[in-house]
Image (tube, grey):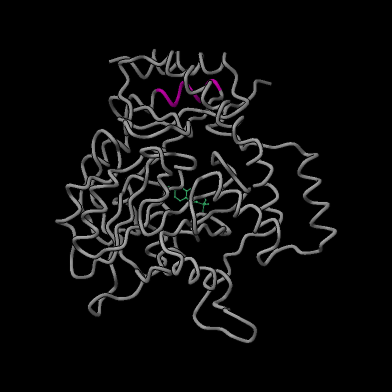
Amino acid sequence: MKEIIPVTKPYLPSREKLNKYIDGIYERNWLTNNGPLVQELTKRLEEYLGVENLLLISNGTLALQIAYRALGINEPANGKPAEAITTPFTFVATSSSLKWEGVNPVFVDIDKDTWNLDPELIEEAITPQTRAIVPVHVFGNPCDVEAIHEIAERHQLKVIYDAAHAFGVNYRNESVLKWGDAATLSFHATKVFHTIEGGAIVFKHKKDLEKAKALINFGITGPDQISELGINAKMSEFNAAMGLCVLDDIIHVFQDRKERYERYMGRLSSRLERQCLNEHSSLNYSYIPILLDEENVLKDTLEVFSDNDIYPRRYFYPSLNNIDISSSCLTLPISESVSSRVLCLPIYSTLKAEDIDGISNIVNSVGGRL
Ligand SMILES: *Cc1c(COP(=O)(O)O)cnc(C)c1O
């Protein structure tokens, strides 16, 4: 049978190495609650990423929710539910997490070239209820962080970056995670760096980190002391063990992806519209997004792909202003247009060169026609 080619496959590190970590967990019999492997992974990630105040979380969605709470943006504003200005062109968790915390997502359109939140449109969307801006570095491409920072300062808003795609990305030679009051990561199995399920928050200020530490552990702040409303969002030792193994191999993970990324770049037609990348940024090769001319062309392309057992994904469709969690019913033409025409092509460590050539041929012949 022909092998199916999915959009991504999780990276699996050496089983032997993972077993050694698991032996340690068995010896210590310490399975969760800020165990030694969670502490080690925290330190090693801070070093690798070049950041401080990193907190490991059980997944990337709770990382967003904890960040909102630690920064107080879920609190009502002027007696009404708080609002956060965010992008409709992202994975649903960016805005469902806001809604889940009682914050209304207010969608603002994206830039037609970078596909990130358009800073020019933010100010007109600010109301007395606005507490935060929640942008996404879409496909690891850094937002216009300076412009967003300036708007946030002027209006005293918090900024929480959903940086789920931006693991290892540097902006002007420093981690892009340093921007914002907080930046969140997802370590889901499908992401470049993973812990099976997991995530992290990088806080700008240590006091917010300390608050979040209590929030992820039921609000417990000491023996017999529960200071506030918390939840359970802790990472387990088994997840940290996987993370330590993947982190040991991260150079190879990036190298494998870089080779595949470059092969695609050499083969995909230059006629295809691509995301306009931030010129001060490094790449993490996490996604291969392409933009087709029309949704019909995208559908035809998908059909040919599925006849060949190849399954690219429509990241991100639909535009989130068109789903139920949105209280407003705006049309956001750029997000809707990009969202209806964008396709992410398969990329993972074991993807074969000949498959990249085959995928590129299909894109060029079916997707590139008109
Ligand atoms: C993956 C992802 C999330 C959610 O992370 P989980 O770890 O799956 O909960 C949030 N935002 C974006 C942009 C993502 O890609």
- Residue 78 against residue 135 in the figure, above or below: below
Give left or right: position of 320 versus 22: left
| Residue 146 place in picture, x, y as percent | 26, 47
Could you tell me which residue is drawn at 49 percent across and 55 percent down? Answer: 52
Nearer to me, 26 or 331? 26
State which region is magenta.
301-308
| Residue 195 place in picture, x, y as percent | 62, 48
Outermost residue, left direction?
Answer: 124
Could you tell me which residue is drawn at 59 percent across and 45 percent down? Answer: 194
Nearer to me, 213 or 199? 213
Residue 303 lies within the magenta run: yes
Q: Quadrant of the N terminus?
A: top right
| Residue 58 place in picture, x, y as percent | 58, 59
Outermost residue, bottom direction?
Answer: 224
Residue 68 lies within the magenta run: no
Could you tell me which residue is drawn at 42 percent across and 63 percent down? Answer: 205
Q: Quadrant of residue 95?
A: bottom left
Q: Main secondary structure of the magenta part?
A: helix
Give left or right: position of 334 versus 220: left
Q: Quadrant of the C terminus?
A: top left
Could you tell me which residue is drawn at 48 percent across and 34 percent down? Answer: 286
Give left or right: position of 77 versus 91: left
| Residue 32 place in picture, x, y as percent | 70, 64
Q: How many marks?
A: 0
- Residue 17 against residue 156 in the figure, above or below: above
